Image (tube, rainbow, N blue to C red):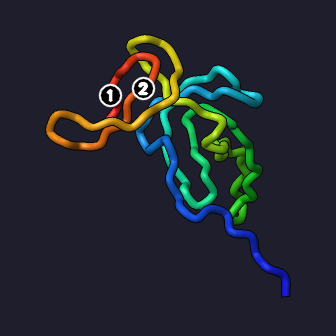
């Protein structure tokens, strides 16, 4: 019997739902959008307006016409970077602690705290 590969031991990503990110590689390189959904199991994210796909939908009932639906397909989380709206720059993140002891994400380039 063939062994299945372990995808990841932990499912931790640097981006969360609601973050503003910039695509750094691929066909949509340079586009900025909001993370609509994070899929930690496959380490992918769905970004608004990025990686648009079309799907031909068959008619469900008699006499109804078919449709062409567009939707955002997932991209790998390594292909996006967090984006600062104030500074208009993409940056890596680091984890730091606030004065009251909370662990928060911070942009390395700007020092802006995200959480």
- Residue 62, compared with residue 31, is above or below; it is below
Residue count near mark 2 (Cα–Cα under 10 Å), binned few <14, some 14–19, many ≥20 = some
Tell me where residue 44 appears, x and y as whole percent. Answer: 61, 49
| Residue 43 against residue 20 in the figure, above or below | below
Q: Residues within 10 Å of mark 1 (few under 14, many from 20)?
A: some
> Relative to 113, is 80 on the left or the right?
right
Q: On the image, numbered disc 1 is attached to which residue?
A: 113
Residue 99 in the image: x percent, y percent?
17, 34
State how many labels appear: 2
Foreground of the two, 3 or 55: 3
- Tell me which residue sits at (46%, 30%) in the image: 20
* Quadrant showing the C terminus: top left
* Quadrant position of residue 100: top left
Q: Which x, y percent locates residue 41? A: 58, 61
Residue lying at the far top in this picture: please name it: 87
Image coordinates of residue 52 in percent, x first then y, are 69, 37
Q: Earlier in the sequence, mark 1 or mark 2?
A: 2
Q: In whole angstroms, how far apart are the C-alphas of marks 1 and 2?
A: 6 Å
According to the image, label 2 marks what residue?
107
Mark carried by residue 77:
none
Residue at far left of view: 100
Q: Residue most toward the right?
A: 1
Name the foreground residue: 2 vs 20: 2
User: On the picture, is 37 further left or further right than 24?
Assistant: left
Question: Does the residue at mark 1 contact the one at mark 2 (Cβ under 8 Å)?
Answer: yes
As drawn, which residue projects farthest toward the bottom?
Answer: 1
């Amino acid at each position: 019997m063939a062994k299945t590969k372990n995808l990841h031991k932990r499912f931790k990503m640097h981006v969360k739902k609601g973050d503003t990110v910039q695509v750094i590689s691929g066909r949509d390189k340079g586009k900025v959008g909001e993370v609509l959904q994070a899929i930690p199991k496959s380490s992918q994210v769905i970004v608004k307006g990025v990686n648009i796909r079309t799907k031909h939908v068959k008619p469900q009932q008699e006499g109804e016409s078919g449709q062409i639906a567009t939707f955002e397909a997932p991209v790998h989380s390594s292909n996006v970077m967090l984006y600062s709206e104030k500074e208009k720059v993409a940056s890596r993140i680091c984890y730091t602690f606030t004065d009251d002891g909370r662990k928060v994400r911070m942009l390395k380039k700007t020092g802006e705290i995200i959480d």
